[in-house]
Image: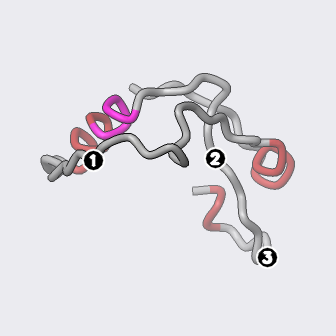
């Protein structure tokens, strides 16, 4: 909701200091939306990321962002 307030035109990463499996994020989203995801699986590509973490410094400064786990 804080990101809906005018802060100009900024790209802001939202995330936490803990990585989550994509399957966990999909499950959370399905539960939240009350809909089942249609998943298509492809072979792993060399350019795909195996893990990544969001740099949330800007979100902390502009939005007073605090991370929470998926629940």
Q: Residue at x 31, y 36 (%)?
A: 28
In the rendered image, residue 61, in percent from the top left (x then y), is placed at 86, 48
Q: Which mark is residue 64?
A: none
Where disc 1 sits, the SS reads loop
Nearer the observer: mark 1 or 3; the answer is 1
Tell me which numbered mark, 1 or 3, is placed earlier along the sequence. 3
Q: Residue at x 27, y 47 (%)?
A: 42
How would you rate the neighbour count of disc 3 (Cα within 10 Å): few for under 14, some for 14-19, many for 20 or more?
A: few
User: Looking at the picture, does residue 4 appear above or below residue 57?
Assistant: below
Quadrant showing the C terminus: top left
Span highlighted in magenta in the image: 22-26
Q: Residues within 10 Å of mark 2 (few under 14, many from 20)?
A: some
Overall secondary structure of the magenta stretch? helix
Q: Nearer the viewer, residue 27 or 65?
A: 27
Q: Residue at 14%, 50% (x, y): give it.
A: 35
Q: Circle 2 is placed at which residue position?
A: 14
Q: How many marks?
A: 3
Label disc, if present, on residue 8 of the rendered structure: 3
Q: CA distance from mark 1 to mark 3?
A: 38 Å
Closest to the observer, 35 or 66 = 35
Disc 3/disc 2 C-alpha distance (Å): 17 Å
Q: Quadrant of residue 29?
A: top left
Instruction: Kindly identify which residue carries mark 1.
Output: 42
**Mark 3 or 2: the one toward you:** 2
Is residue 24 inside the magenta stretch?
A: yes
Residue 38: % across, % down = 15, 52
| Image quarter in which the N terminus is found | bottom right
């Amino acid at each position: 909701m804080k990101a809906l307030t005018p802060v100009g035109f900024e790209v802001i990463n939202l995330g936490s200091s803990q990585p989550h499996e994509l399957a966990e994020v999909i499950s959370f989203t399905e539960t939240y939306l009350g809909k089942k995801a249609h998943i298509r699986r492809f072979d792993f590509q060399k350019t795909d990321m195996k893990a990544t973490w969001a740099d949330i410094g800007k979100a902390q400064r502009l939005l007073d962002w605090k991370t929470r786990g998926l629940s």
